[in-house]
Amino acid sequence: MAADTEDLDSIRERAERWLADDPDPADRAELQTVLDDLPASAPELADRFAGPLTFGTAGLRGPLRAGPNGMNLAVVTQAAAGLVAWLAAQGGTGPLVIGYDARHRSREFAERTAQVATGAGRPALLLPRPLPTPVLAYAVRQLGAVAGVMVTASHNPPQDNGYKVYLGAELGGPLGAGAQIVPPADAGIEAAIRAVGPLAEVPLGPPGQLLGDDLVAGYVAHAVEVLPAYGPRELRVAYTPLHGVGAAVLTAAFAAAGFPVPGVVPDQAEPDPDFPTVSFPNPEEPGAVDLLVALAESTDADLAIANDPDADRCAVAVRSEQGWRMLRGDEVGVLLADHLMRRGVTGLYATTIVSSSLLRAMCTARNLPYDETLTGFKWIVRAGGGADPLVFGYEEALGYCVAPEHVRDKDGITAALTVAELAAGLKAQGRTLTDRLDELAAEFGVHHTDQLSVRVDDLRLIADAMARIRATTPTTLLGHPITEAQDLLPEADVVILRTDTARVVIRPSGTEPKLKAYLEVVEPVTNGEVAAARSRAALAVSALRTETATALGI
């Protein structure tokens, strides 16, 4: 009991010191309420002070709440001061450009970041309103910024927010110009954040320069340039931004490209940080696109498209004999890659270790450069090390980069345009995206992918499962001997198992409390019987899911 009392006293002292330095009255009042409720609130207080949010390659992300283990004005002020100090220490001289989405407190955090930058003598450029993340990535390159900050939690729950950092050409080099940071920049910024002194001593300057709509117009124009000037444009599209910031930019891009303006789900058209019509604002989650599918059905749409709330991801649904179905990220990825290849786009095509192996097979057959990276677009856009120019990259989690010379990150707007161009061209021929997928399967075999994803409350369960698979690695999958078992530690916490026809990649999520296993089965197509091969592959993947869950003990 004495030890517990001592621990509580220590946490209380840290909380009181934090209170004295917190610049936000509302956050101070929130934390004071927790302190006033001690000892009943001891577990909550301990969680808020379990440690600071750590700045990694995904920046910061966490729940909106007072204390060091949350997103709040004090944490953002400290992060901005550390980032600006690190940029100065690296000799970076350009301006800092700052964007934000429509989540709770996003604009406030963006404006504070601008004040910290100008207070340190660095020009700050603020995007004119809540905008998609790819617009910020575009702005970093277009404006010659030393770095960019995007205040967003992407598709996380409503109570979260986050802080992503992009580097310009000055510090990121040609491959990292406008791309998310990678090591060792993350560790350098984290160290600089921890070195920030009392927040009252962080100088705050003017609000910086508010950018105009010409920047957004430039982004839209460059997105449209991804498409050939002429081609079929007749396509009925149903669309949802999932209460995020994508609608205005996407509809403007479709109109500028000559497509009919998509019909937008009315109840999800405007930004709303509470995401009232979905339980989880991620188009991959069950039920998230139900309203989109209903709109597509009622309007007899040819295609249904969803962006996540910050519009850097793109989900696509197509009509099938069983009704509307969402295409997997791998399916959209290979459709886009194949479309660009057919257009004669040469250069490097890249994906990640957890994506389908079909892209590799396509590049091999068509004599095109290919590379495979760790998960995350920070790695995809640096694929190949510059030996060949990157022309397309994708990850299975609905992220696609179809114009790396303009946006060196995943971009849900240009991906949606390119999918629409492909679908319109096929429609003019009396065909569909599903027909094209069948063509690829007939040529390269069915590459059926799936994912086993387990959300946990206790992160130790993930660590235990990863330790278990390393200690007792299976020797077979689906009755076939494992031909290759890779453990990517310490570079990445990833285990890969392969047979001659199957693959499993196991890793913890980098942004959510999830353990993920990425499954793939390759089934050859004989005598053109694609449907039969798909059925066999689906059964095999279902069995592989069961085997993997058993091996992980989950």
Image (cartoon, rainbow, N blue to C red):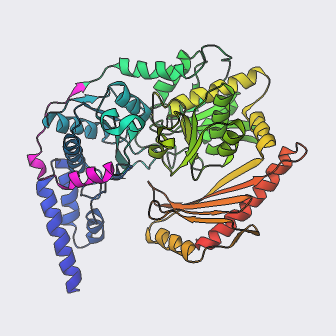
At a point 18% along the width and 79% down the height, the residue shown is: 6
The N terminus sits in image quarter: bottom left
Residue pushed farthest bottom?
1
For the residue pair 262 and 187, the one nearer the viewer reads as 187
The percent coordinates of residue 429 (x first, y second) are: 78, 22
Q: Quadrant of residue 517?
A: bottom right
Range of residues picked out in magenta: 184-209
Viewer-side residue, 125 vs 316: 125
Q: Determine the residue positioned at 73% across, 64% down.
A: 543
Residue 224 magenta: no
Left or right: 301, with 174 as reference point: right
Residue 147 in the image: above or below residue 533: above
Q: Could you tell me residue 365's position as x and y percent? A: 72, 39
Is 93 placed left or right of 452 in the picture?
A: left
* Residue at the outermost left position: 201
Q: Looking at the image, is 75 positioned above or below residue 87?
A: below
Inspect this view and state whether residue 101 appears: no
Quarter of the image containing the C terminus?
bottom right
- Give the side of residue 229 with respect to residue 375, left or right: right
Q: Which percent across, then down, holds residue 487?
A: 54, 65
Task: Relative to 300, say whether 315 is above or below.
Answer: below
**Residue farthest to the front, as pictured:** 387
Q: Is residue 22 above or below residue 107?
A: below
Q: In this view, does 336 lie to the left or right of 434?
A: left
Count of number-bearing discs? 0
Q: Where's residue 11, x and y in %?
A: 20, 70
Task: Based on the picture, tell me whether residue 188 belongs to the magenta stretch.
Answer: yes
Residue located 81% across and 55% down the image: 536
